Image (tube, rainbow, N blue to C red):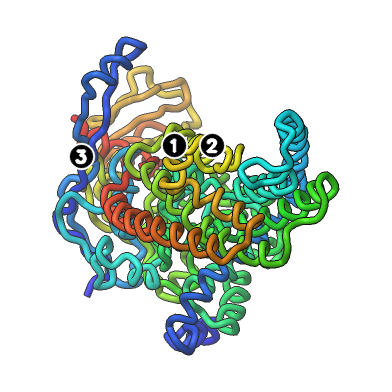
Amino acid sequence: MPAISVRDLRKTFQMKRKAAGLRGSLRALWRPDYQSVEAVRGLSFEMEDGELLGFIGPNGAGKSTTIKILTGILHPSSGEAAVLGHVPWEQRQALAFQIGSVFGQRPQLWYHLPAVDTFYLFGKIYELDDSSLKRRISFLAEAFEIEELLETPVRKLSLGQRMRCEVAASLLHKPRVLLLDEPSIGLDVVAKQRLRMTIQRMNELEGVGVLLTSHDAGDIETLCRRVIIINHGEIVYRDKVSALKRRYLTVKTVDVRYNEQLAPDFSLPGVEMVKVGRYGAKMRFDTRVTPVEPVISGLAAAGSLADVTVSEPSLEEVISAIYERTEA
Amino acid sequence: MRSREADVLSPESRVRGPAAAAVVGKYWAIFRTQLVNSLAYPIDLLGRSLAIVLFMWIFMNLWRVTYGATGASSIAGLTLADTMWYLMMAEAVMLSKRDLSETISEQVKDGSVAYLLNKPFNFILYHFAAGLGHSLLSFGGNLLIGSGIVWLMVGPPPGIMGWLFAGVAVALSWLLDFCFSTLIGLSAFVVEETNAFRWIYQKFLLLLGGVLIPLDFFPAWLQTISLNLPFAWIIYGPARLFVDPSLARLGQVLLQQGIWLAVFGGIVWVTYRRAVARLVINGG
């Protein structure tokens, strides 16, 4: 049985619209104008037990709404969902014992108290006995490298330190599924990397399944084997991250330098010349149209090579291209 | 590490014994954590408790002139000392109320309500336990400082029965106020901004609840209206019982509080079930 199973899930919100200015405000009072916004449109997917699944999309794509439906906080307009065998919005409390969640920068730790106070509170809320709770806190403190931070008031922690404490708090009751909604938002590169490593480690150690939403393709690339990309509430891509790369990373950029001057009309068939200089050139080609072998041979035949660099677009660029394609 | 972890949180890690004990334990922990949280800024706590000194000083001057002008030692059965002790208790209850409606409204607006709805506790009882943690400390401070200043101004407080009876009535008055605040707070699930409702409720408490004037001083018709509304049993009931701790009055206050609690407790429960189903959480 999959850990998460979603079938044709839909969520429509009624949003009040108002024209600009005082006139618009008065008109909205007299005749309010509501617009239906479909945040989630017929989403269907599954997540296996212990899987690290990436769920990405631009702002307003419906990622957070989906996560909130899966935690049971929001009721869908239609469709079905099961998380660990529970219908989330009908069995929210029973499900709460088996899932953990972190919603971006919204704190669940008590702001004026040291994190350890919230840990003990959560221990009681999840009905853990005292000795198990103590052992669990010390295990998580070690795994998340937060031993030194536990007794500092949360308000004094850096964002990166706080996020590590937040994720650790969400794992106190050893959930089977962890729903992480933009956990890396606002973090610097080092803090992001540290958080990713810890999430990966907890997945390996305890087999906790992770559904991760993020803007950051780096989160997905590092953590997830499979990715679902959504835009305007619909799935626009789903496959392994490696397949995503294989399928979309076909455009190569080549930077080449020669020991001798290049012919002024230097060109290669099927290759777009971005820039041609006296001793080097920058060019681009798509491997689906132009095979690699003749390009490399052509480069070698053009003169004595000093250096060649072949680069691919980042996953970020690939994902933007997918969004753009679905916008068109 | 895995093997060390494997046995840490097995199903047996849950608290043993009756399920009720675990449930009481979690709300007790919420209450205690809020108590500790309120102590995070002791100077702020003390400062807020000192507000009662200013209020009592103003009331003393106001009512001394009023009693002096009438030439009577008591008005509607209350001496100046009774009135001051009544007002001290009324202010102590009023000032220690936690503005839960604002808390819920903020949680809905900033989206943090999400964390409270996906934990294994009841959202309403969570707020009650947390509110109690806040109010008890604040009430204790207000009572201590308020009693000190009023004692200096008009002499000793009513007897032990007054404290005991008022204690019971204040507990129920917090519950009743909790129902109102929760209803206003839950309206945030639909309208988000609840300032207007909160303002109206506060004014009802001030005017018809007996915060500014004991209801006994009202004309008969206004007194009848006030006593038939729930606001009087949040402030007036406990404060009046404090200065007149008769069994008859205790019975009247508890009966009124019980009736209004049954009515508004039911409304809160139904409203909560409906509000949760139509919740919209901001921020995606």
Are the numbered discs 2 and 1 placed on the same chain, yes or no? yes
Cα–Cα gap, marks 3 and 2 = 56 Å
**Position of residue B70 measured from the top left corner of the image (x, y, whole percent):** 70, 31
Cα–Cα gap, marks 2 and 1 = 8 Å
* Residue underneath mark 1: B221
* Quadrant for the C terminus of chain B in the image: top left
Element type where label 1 sits in the image: helix
The answer to which of B155 and A309 lies nearer the viewer is B155
Element type where label 2 sits in the image: loop
Q: Is residue A111 left or right of residue B252?
A: right
Pick out the residue farthest to the front: B72
Chain of the residue under label 3 = A
Residue for point 26% across, 32% down: A15
Residue for point 74% across, 33% down: B71
The answer to which of A146 and A96 lies nearer the viewer is A96
Please give the label number shown on residue B218.
2
Residue for point 33% across, 14% down: A20
Cα–Cα gap, marks 1 and 3 = 55 Å
Please give the label number shown on residue A38.
3
The answer to whether residue B237 is above or below residue B63 is below
* Quadrant for the N terminus of chain B in the image: bottom right
